[in-house]
Amino acid sequence: MQNIVSNFKISGKLKSIEPYKNGLVNKTFLVITSTNKYLLQRINKYVFKDPNQVMKNINFVTNHLKSLNRRTLNIIKTKANQIIYFDNLTKEYYRLYDFLDDLYSISLTNNPEIYLEVGKVIGNFQSDFSEVSPETLVETIPKFHYTINRINYLKEIIKQSKVNMRRFEKCKSICEILINEESATCKIQNHLDSFLLPIRIVHNDTKLNNIMFDKASNKGICLIDLDTVMPGTIIFDFSDAVRSSCATLNEDDPTLYDLDIDDQKFVCLLIGYLSKSKSFITDIELELLIEGIKTIIYECAVRFITDYLENDIYFKTNYQNHNLTRAINQLKLYFICKKKEVYYKKLVQTVYFRLI
Ligand code: GN1
Ligand code: MG
């Protein structure tokens, strides 16, 4: 690792490089020198087929945010003045960022004000890009949130027996339930396919631990993990934040008895989000916000069970059945969301018209 770090323009004398908790996809290290702290990341080549383009997108996004005086990730260039480093020996791609030492990320908390901040951060990010043409960024993971493709892929690998059969025996009924629910989750994709939803620059991965808060004031400051900032719909940014932060349990918690969506957190997030997005959100986007929550939870369940059946090639796992646990958790959350759908849709209307 020392060799890798030495290729970047770091200041101070290298003191330590330690693995750092972060995300289910890339590998992250905290780099400490005598004067600074940095985050080194090895980009997951299986997930991101074109790491150079991912970094070009991130470079654009961070420069745009900086031009608006927003806090964001700061890319440290290599000594050859590049935004990414390719290690010939291991054939791996690396990038380095300044470590945001005055900010922190959270896991679930009961403080409702935090959820107001979550909503605001997402609304602000979308607002900062609402005037930028989506074609500016390349779709580095094509059709990332095209839910139907995800379920079709699952059906296909089952049909062609390209699954771990021992694992399939364990989760056959889960797959069946997911396949049965397919039609309930295609509304947003139908709207996208018929060009009824605006395509904008969006974050696409707004889970709670990708949101940074200020240590001193607890205000929401910015979104990190900019790998998936691409053209897409704002609906899923709102929805994924609800999925990951308003649930009463983490996405891989197996103690499902207590799993629910917390209405108070949801209302706070909604108020925060609409207070920042009401100037650009269209009627159809507003109408489909709750549909988005249901869809994104369903999509996650499908992605986790697919990865389980493909022997955990995509998401990092800590134990044998980790992806199965995640899929079961999300499936239950999906049905909880379905039950609350009508109530939440009314809340969207109530909050939106109060804010005008
Ligand atoms: C991954 O990278 P990370 O951990 O923030 C995934 C998201 C999933 C999430 C589930 C590029 O996000 O789409 O919703 O795991 N990112 C990618 O925890 O696939
Ligand atoms: Mg990510």
Image (cartoon, rainbow, N blue to C red):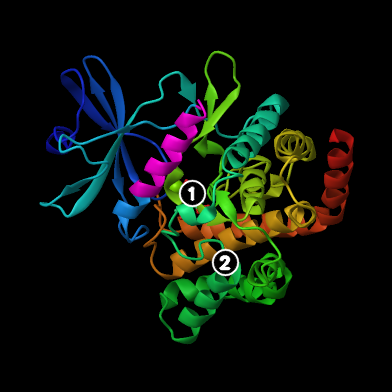
Tell me the residue at 32%/39% (across/down): 28
Position of 173 with respect to 65 (left or right) is right
**Magenta region, residue range:** 55-70
Q: Is mark 1 within 8 Å of ligand 2?
A: no
Answer yes or no: is residue 319 visible.
yes
Say the numbered circle drawn on residue 146. 2
Residue 173, percent from left and from top:
61, 74
Q: Give the secondary structure at mark 1.
A: loop
Position of 236 with respect to 187 (left or right) is left
> Circle 1 sits on which residue?
229
Q: Which is nearer the eye, 337 or 103?
A: 103
Q: Is disc 2 in contact with disc 1, using a CB cutoff of under 8 Å?
A: no
Residue 166, percent from left and from top:
43, 75
Q: Which is nearer the eye, 79 or 89?
A: 79
Residue flagged by tag 1: what amino acid is it? Answer: Val
Q: Quadrant of the C terminus?
A: top right
Q: CA distance from mark 2 to mark 1?
A: 15 Å
